């Protein structure tokens, strides 16, 4: 067991922060090597934290708190992890390591700037998942805008300026609402008494439910809007396909695997954890929105001719399962939503990386231009594509199946489905969402057919190469977790289930105490 006094979380934050500076001042030829060393160190530190973590414990572990600012607002440096945070930090470390390995071609242009921004982005994402002070959470949540904007705007495709600016505007707009909600919450807590005003997220989980239903609803909606934009959810999703199409492959991997999870994490940690009364009232709406995202984005995938846009809309669809699970307010639904965050992180990273391998060889992302037959010359890429695609459509024994099956079970056992006035609506939502699974199978298998099956075209004969060693390593690392979590999901669930069960019980108790039909007093 690893003792908590080793400051592992601070080390996890300082490694990429210090790395961004060191890479920026070192010779460019060192940049990639340093980035690999730093991300490898993050993986080992995260493994040490996982070894010392106590799965049956609900509260924060490895906590560190230092008084930072006292006026005009009390802000602390406060970090800690529970099962949910630990799983997301592990995902961040592994995907970032894979993304650095995948940057072999991209990072050759201005390597010091590229890898420095990549490390700064990693520090921001990691900080969001370990922060236990709400101001610190907000600052790190917004900090990722800077490196991500430049990573797209400098190394992106032909429409990179448009995509980067659209990403910046959408997410910055959400940040404004989060800041307003944060300050509003702090002010309302002051009305309860001076001792209640705090930005400590552990204390806020206890104090915020004491507020009135209207106050909770207003604050919850402010946070929720910011998180829904980042998730992204309809109608705030349009920035995502453009950002994915223009971003270089390693940045797309981080964008799909990690940035979207910041929104999902916020929904669980803040909206569900701080405002149970509001979530009870918004639960059926969240389930309906999740079902709509699942189906609508899956339909959008069927009409795309760009490989990246297919996987981008697929991400919107699969994040709908997270919304559906959270809105169900059941222990199983919340467990499934959290598992989906991690599972989709590995699957989407693998798919975007594999899109990049095909693009590097064919120099086009247009499915109609590729024309099929690639499996004959690129069998290894085809096998990895097949595995990732089957995981994305939810084949049993792969991680995607565990997540989706648990979410649907949680939706069917939702306490809201037991309320006579809402039962029919909830069951209709579940049936609609289930059609998304059929459409996912349709667009993923159709994509495979159009890329790899059929006769080999003359224009590709003798021009396509197999996978390089570093490409095999990246794809293998990501697919290993896809298979491993599908075969043995308890590697994740044992760590966050106590937290998910407690949150679901809290929500159910508020539902039982007269909130079956939510009204504003």
Image (spheres, grey):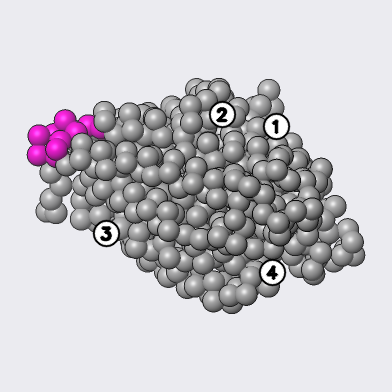
Asked whether the residues under the numbered discs 1 and 3 touch, taking CB atoms below 8 Å apart as contact, a structural biologist would say no
- Image disc number at residue 155: 4
- Disc 1 target residue: 48
Say if the magenta span includes residue 121.
no
Whole-angstrom CA distance, mark 4 to mark 1, is 34 Å
Whole-angstrom CA distance, mark 3 to mark 4, is 39 Å
| Residue bounds of the magenta highlight | 414-424
- Image disc number at residue 218: 3
Front of the two marks 2 and 1: 2
Residue 413 position in % (x across, y down): 26, 28
Asked whether the residues under the numbered discs 2 and 1 touch, taking CB atoms below 8 Å apart as contact, a structural biologist would say no
- Disc 2 target residue: 485
Asked whether the residues under the numbered discs 2 and 3 touch, taking CB atoms below 8 Å apart as contact, a structural biologist would say no
Secondary structure under tag 3 reads helix
Tag 3 or tag 2, which sits nearer the N-term? 3
Residue 371 position in % (x across, y down): 59, 56
Secondary structure under tag 2 reads helix
Whole-angstrom CA distance, mark 2 to mark 3, is 38 Å
């Amino acid at each position: 067991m690893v003792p908590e006094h080793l400051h592992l979380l601070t080390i996890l934050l300082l490694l990429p922060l210090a790395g961004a500076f060191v890479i920026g001042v070192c010779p460019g030829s060192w940049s990639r090597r340093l980035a690999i060393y730093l991300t490898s160190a993050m993986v080992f530190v995260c493994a040490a934290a996982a070894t010392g973590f106590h799965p049956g414990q609900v509260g924060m572990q490895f906590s560190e708190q230092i008084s930072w600012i006292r006026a005009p607002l009390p802000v602390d440096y406060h970090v800690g992890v529970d099962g949910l945070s630990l799983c997301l930090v592990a995902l961040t470390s592994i995907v970032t390591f894979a993304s650095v390995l995948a940057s072999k071609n991209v990072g050759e242009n201005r390597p010091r700037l590229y890898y420095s921004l990549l490390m700064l982005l990693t520090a921001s994402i990691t900080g969001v998942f370990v922060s236990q002070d709400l101001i610190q959470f907000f600052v790190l949540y917004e900090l990722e805008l800077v490196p991500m904007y430049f990573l797209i705007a400098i190394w992106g495709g032909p429409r990179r300026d448009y995509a980067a600016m659209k990403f910046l505007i959408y997410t910055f707009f959400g940040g404004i609402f989060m800041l307003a909600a944060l300050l509003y919450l702090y002010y309302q807590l002051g009305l309860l008494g001076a001792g209640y005003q705090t930005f400590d997220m552990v204390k806020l989980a206890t104090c915020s439910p004491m507020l009135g239903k209207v106050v909770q609803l207003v604050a919850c909606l402010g946070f929720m809007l910011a998180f829904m934009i980042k998730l992204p959810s309809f109608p705030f999703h349009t920035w995502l396909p453009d950002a994915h199409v223009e971003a270089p492959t390693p940045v797309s991997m981080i964008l799909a695997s990690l940035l979207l999870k910041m929104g999902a994490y916020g929904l669980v940690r803040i909206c569900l954890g701080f405002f149970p009364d509001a979530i009870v009232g918004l639960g059926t709406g969240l389930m309906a929105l999740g079902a709509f995202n699942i189906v609508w984005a899956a339909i959008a995938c069927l009409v795309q001719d760009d490989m990246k846009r297919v996987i981008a809309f697929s991400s919107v669809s699969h994040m709908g399962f997270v919304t559906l699970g959270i809105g169900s307010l059941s222990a199983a639904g919340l467990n499934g939503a959290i598992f989906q965050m991690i599972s989709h992180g590995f699957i989407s990273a693998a798919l975007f990386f594999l899109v990049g391998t095909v693009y590097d060889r064919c120099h086009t992302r247009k499915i109609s231009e590729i024309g099929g037959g690639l499996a004959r010359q690129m069998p290894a890429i085809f096998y990895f594509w097949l595995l990732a695609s089957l995981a994305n459509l939810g084949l049993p024994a792969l991680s995607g199946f565990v997540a989706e099956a648990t979410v649907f079970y949680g939706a069917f056992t939702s306490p809201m489905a037991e309320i006579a006035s809402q039962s029919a609506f909830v069951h209709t939502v579940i049936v609609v969402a289930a059609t998304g699974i059929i459409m996912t199978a349709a667009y993923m298998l159709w994509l495979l057919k159009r890329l790899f099956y059929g006769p080999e075209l003359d224009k590709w004969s003798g021009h396509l190469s197999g996978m390089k060693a570093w490409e095999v390593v990246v794809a293998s690392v990501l697919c290993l977790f896809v298979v491993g979590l599908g075969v043995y999901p308890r590697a994740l669930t044992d760590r966050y289930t106590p937290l998910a069960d407690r949150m679901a019980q809290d929500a159910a108790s508020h539902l039982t105490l007269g909130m079956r039909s939510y009204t504003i007093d």
